[in-house]
Image (cartoon, helix red, strand yellow):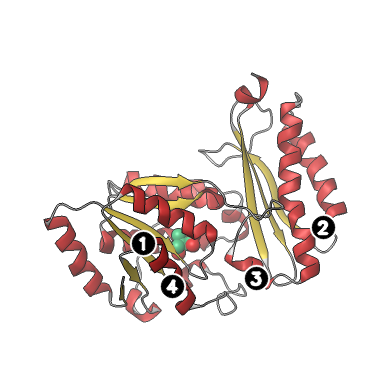
Amino acid sequence: MDIITEPSALGERAREWTRAGRTVGFVPTMGYLHAGHESLMALARKRAEVVVASVFVNPTQFGPGEDLEAYPRDPERDAALAKRVGVDVLFTPQAEAMYAPEAATWVEAPSLARHLCGASRPTHFRGVCTVVAKLFLLVRPTVAVFGQKDWQQLAIIRRMNADLGFGVEIVGAPIVRESDGLALSSRNVRLTPAERAEAVGISRGLALAEAMVQSGERDAGRIVAEVRARYATDMPSGVVDYLECVDPAAIEPVAAIAGPVLFAAAVKFAAVRLIDNRYVDVQAASR
Ligand code: PAF
């Protein structure tokens, strides 16, 4: 596995792959890799001849007072994991190499960022979109793999990819969970043991939402109220940032459930904000 830090060197390598007609799979990450990232890389490995992963804690997707500095980092462990999974090139740029001081261009899809994380982190998705666009331009991937835990991010990237004509096949990979159901996240490591014990409540609440749909409840407001009550009992030290039932493609609130929906939650513990979601297909539920 080669580790490349210079964008121009990666761009040159990618042009060689294009000239040689090789398929390229890409997995962008912010590092502190875990089994969730591993599953994305394994998927890219199956789908393409060359696999590129990036590790870049992208400053533009963090707002003021968020955890940019505290975001966990372990470059050596990341490189070992990427190598083990069969990544061919690991791209680990410095922020200065990715953003010129005078950079003034943003890529964004505001209509998909009105709710969920876009509402509580107003500049987050333009940072994500901009960096992913820049990475796509460098890597020129055939296929790029993103985790469904960041469902809204995936919807926005699909939109950007279509609107700007990148022509990348965007693949969404299932959420990987701890054995008790907590969604894997690089940020989990920053939970105290007591918070970790509570945090499983996030996925349990989302499972309750699904169970309510399965037993015939179609009023999203009633479901959300029930799950909120459960969150208050199960996670006394968690603050619910949002809990919503949205259309999975438009990321707009749904009141009466008549088709597939996404229940999505963000819960803040003292130093850590965690997100999770559950896709529920009402047709499948009533079959
Ligand atoms: O999902 C992430 O880790 C990041 O948002 C991404 C896609 C790597 C962009 O920085």
Disc 3 is placed on an element classified as helix
Q: Which mark is nearer the camera, 3 or 4?
A: 4
Under mark 4, the amino acid is Ala
Residue on which the image places disc 3: 189
Furthest-left residue in this view? 19
- Residue 36 or 10: which is nearer the viewer? 36
CA gap, disc 3 to disc 2?
A: 18 Å
x and y percentages locating residue 105 in the rendered image? 35, 65
Instruction: Report the Cα–Cα distance between label 1 and label 3.
Output: 25 Å
Q: Who comes first in sequence, dot 3 or dot 2?
A: 3
Front tag of 3 and 2: 3
Type of the residue with mark 1: Gly
Disc 4 to disc 1: CB gap under 8 Å: no
Judging from the image, what secondary structure is the residue with disc 2 in? Answer: loop
Q: CA distance from mark 2 to mark 1?
A: 39 Å
Q: Residue 22, how many percent across, how many down?
A: 19, 53
Mark linked to residue 235: 2
Left or right, 196 with reference to 147: right
Position above or below: 81 against 164: below
Residue 125 in sight from this viewpoint: no
Does residue 23 appear left or right of residue 159 in this picture? left
Query: Rounded to the nearest whole Å, what is the CA distance between mark 3 and mark 4?
Result: 19 Å
Circle 3: is it few (<14), some (14-19), or many (20+) Cα within 10 Å? some
The answer to which of marks 4 and 1 sits earlier in the sequence is 4
Q: Amino acid at mark 3?
A: Val
Q: Which residue is mark 1?
A: 86
Question: Which of the two labelled residues, at mark 2 and mark 4, occupies the earlier sequence position?
Answer: 4
**Percent from the top left, x then y, of residue 74?**
51, 78
Which residue has dot 4 on it? 80
